[in-house]
Amino acid sequence: MYGATIFKELRKAGLKVEAHNIRFRHNTEDVDWLATVGEKKWIVLMRDLAIGKNPIELNALLYAKVRAFALQRGDLPDAENSRIVIAALPKILRILTEHSEPFIAKITKGGNVYLWKTKPIPIPRNPR
């Protein structure tokens, strides 16, 4: 969860942002809130790189046709993360213009932005 600092700084930069908990309960299943986000064409900013290794969560995001940006260093303070996102805005806008959903792009500490995940992960079936 982000603190108020990142939202304040992103708003000062002219972005319309809101926290997940403004629209969804904290325990809302990913499949449910991601479906809403994809339908409304909202963009997700997250620090959850573990999603790339979790086929259920990753596939929920991609099947919902979400456009998401993940901070590569989610452990940084919100003030630093907001500076990174603001500096990366031109690259974020380029990705949004040049690539259709679904995708997750990574935002590096140095402000680079690149596509990371665009295809669902096949989930192996349990042989019986």
Image (cartoon, rainbow, N blue to C red):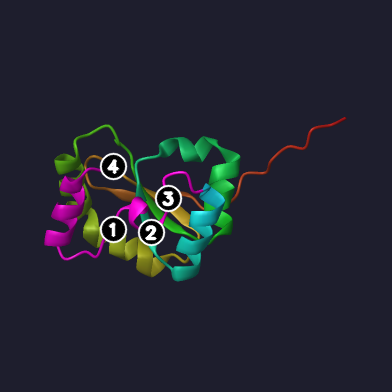
Compared to 101, does 88 lie above or below?
above
> Residue 25 got which mark?
3
Q: Is residue 15 left or right of residue 72?
A: left
Residue assigned mark 2: 23
What amino acid is found at the position of numbered circle 1 in the picture? Glu
Whole-number angstrom distance, CA of label 2 to CA of label 4:
27 Å
Location of the C terminus by quadrant is top right
Compared to 30, does 23 lie above or below?
below
Whole-number angstrom distance, CA of label 1 to CA of label 3:
13 Å
Q: Are marks 2 and 1 in contact (CB under 8 Å)?
A: yes
Give percent across and percent down for residue 108: 28, 42
Question: Can residue 59 be found in the magenta stretch?
Answer: no
> Residue 75 got which mark?
none
Label 3: few (<14), some or many (≥20) within 10 Å? few
> Residue 108 got which mark?
4
Q: Is residue 10 left or right of residue 122?
A: left
Query: Which label lies toward us, 1 or 4?
Result: 1
| Secondary structure beneath label 2 | helix
What amino acid is found at the position of numbered circle 2 in the picture? Arg
Q: Residue at x 47, y 59 (%)?
A: 66
Give percent across and percent down for residue 96: 37, 65
Residue assigned mark 1: 18
